[in-house]
Amino acid sequence: MRRSIKILAENLEKCPYTSATTTTAPPRRFSEIPGPREIPVIGNSGNLKYVIGTDAETIENYNKHLEEMYNKYGKIVKEHLGFGRKYVVHVFDPADAQTVFAADGKTPFIVPLQETTQKYREMKGMNPGLGNLNGPEWYRLRSSIQHAMMRPQSVQTYLPFSQKVSEDLVKHVAEEQIRFGNVNMQKVAGRWSLESAGQILFEKSLESLGNRSEWADGLIELNKKIFQLSAQMRLGLPIFRLFSTPSWRKMVKLEDEFYAEVDRLMDDALDNLKSSESDSQNMRFASYLINRKELNRRDVKVILLSMFSDGLSTTAPMLIYNLYNIATHPEALRKIQEEIKEDPTSSKLPYLRACIKETFRMFPIGTEVSRITQKDLTLSGYLIPAGTAVDINTNILMRNMILFSDSPHEFKPERWLEKSKSVHPFAFLPFGFGPRMCAGRRFAEQDLLTSLAKLCANFDIRHRGEPITQIYETLLLPRGNCEFEFKKL
Ligand code: HEM
């Protein structure tokens, strides 16, 4: 990891943002970090709006609250969460992000994205899963999938399945277009991500893009409700930690329903797969896992469940955001179509890749990448003691005026193709960084590239109506008109 930091840091001198943060003065005290006024018990004055008014609009605008804090207090802000919770330090400077990641060590510690899911799994005697674990148990499970998930060559094994899913998607989109006159991508993207998860994780078609689309819609809706409620409970009063509140009981019911379905899918897959002596390089994911001697069936299920639940809510919105950018920029669609026409079998597609990268920048799926520091650090000149929760606000960083000064809110895929333009290497972190970087990154990138290429090669795509924006529902999910017109070429 140190080497990758070194490589990424090669452009640093060119960045005005970084040099401003370099200082030799002794660090200032933690208590001096700027932030909203603190009120005993409640914590930050800013928390009041979440405690008093956990209405949907307040929660949905949490990302705007972060932006306001950045505008008001600057590139480092301290917030006390109140009600027995501790401080979180928000950083909005890529140089600080680099310092935090450099200190990650072999087992970076994180604050779980969904505390409610962690609590539910603990209550049921389940392992909390990759994205909620810390320490040696996280390391043991993560090491066992590193080879199969993170090496580009390993993920290539799944290319034929990804291509099959993209062909099913094209067929499904054409049918929906004829049937409804427009395609509701909120539904179709969810079915697509479920189908892809089935192929990768359960080694079979779930027929989500075929005759089981209603079943798929039900599971996706359930997952959406869990994310919405989880956002409310994360920002509201944390009474559910102590008592069984109505929200907690509702959450347990939703999670029960979700796990009953996923458990059945995992058991079906594992009962049908056998241990094999064949070359593990060419095995699909579940087969690869059951052939790992260090993993028992329970471990395999923990990994499958983590991958399933983390993948379901991320790739579907990313497909929608990509389609939106492409459909609202006809010249970009034309360039993608020309690129594909020139070399129909190539998977290089530099222009489409730049469009995807630009969409990750403009529509980040998460508000932050979190870490709990394991040693004392100096961030923006302030001393941060070990054990502090630090949120690296990727959402703000990737649309920052200084870092993307020419046009942070414009869709400009060309910025990723122009070699002369240097972007701070820690300003663009859609998948996080280091040993805890998104475990599904390669799958997500491959699926998006393959399916977007297929859609662009087959259709002229149009978006009309209310623009798509983002709202906070634990992740940053689409709001606006997600209906598209797909005209067969
Ligand atoms: C397009 C989509 C996606 C984005 C932008 C995304 C982003 C992220 C980010 C930012 C993290 C935290 C990384 C860190 O702390 O440094 C993460 C973690 C994770 N992601 Fe993704 N993700 C995506 C898709 C997926 C998919 C498709 C899967 C599964 C197939 C997946 C599985 C996971 C898992 C298991 C973790 C936890 C890793 C750990 O803590 O060891 N993600 N993702």
Image (cartoon, grey):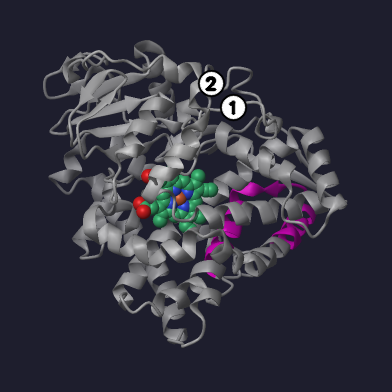
Which residue is at 47% across, 44% downward?
431
Residues under labels 2 and 1: Cα distance?
7 Å
Residue type pointed to by label 1: Ser
Crowding at mark 1 (Cα within 10 Å: few <14, some 14-19, many 20+): some
Q: In which quarter of the image is residue 67?
A: top left
Spot occupied by residue 35 in the image (x, y as percentages of width and height): 27, 16
Q: Mark 2 points at which residue?
A: 14
Viewer-side residue, 386 vs 323? 386
Can residue 224 be seen in the rendering of this structure? no
- Contact, mark 2 vs mark 1 (Cβ under 8 Å): yes
Q: Is most of the magenta stretch helix, strand or loop?
A: helix
Viewer-side residue, 27 vs 71? 27
- Does 160 appear in magenta? no
As helix, strand or loop, the secondary structure at mark 1 comes to: loop
Q: Mark 1 points at which residue?
A: 422
Q: In which quarter of the image is residue 465?
A: top right
Q: Which mark is residue 390?
A: none
Viewer-side residue, 474 vs 200? 200
Residue type pointed to by label 2: Lys
Which residue is at 59% across, 59% downward?
191
Spot occupied by residue 120 in the image (x, y as percentages of width and height): 25, 56
Q: What are the residue bounds of the magenta stretch?
A: 169-198
Answer with mark 2 or mark 1, whichever residue precedes in sequence: 2
Spot occupied by residue 335 in the image (x, y as percentages of width and height): 81, 40
Can residue 104 be seen in the rendering of this structure? yes
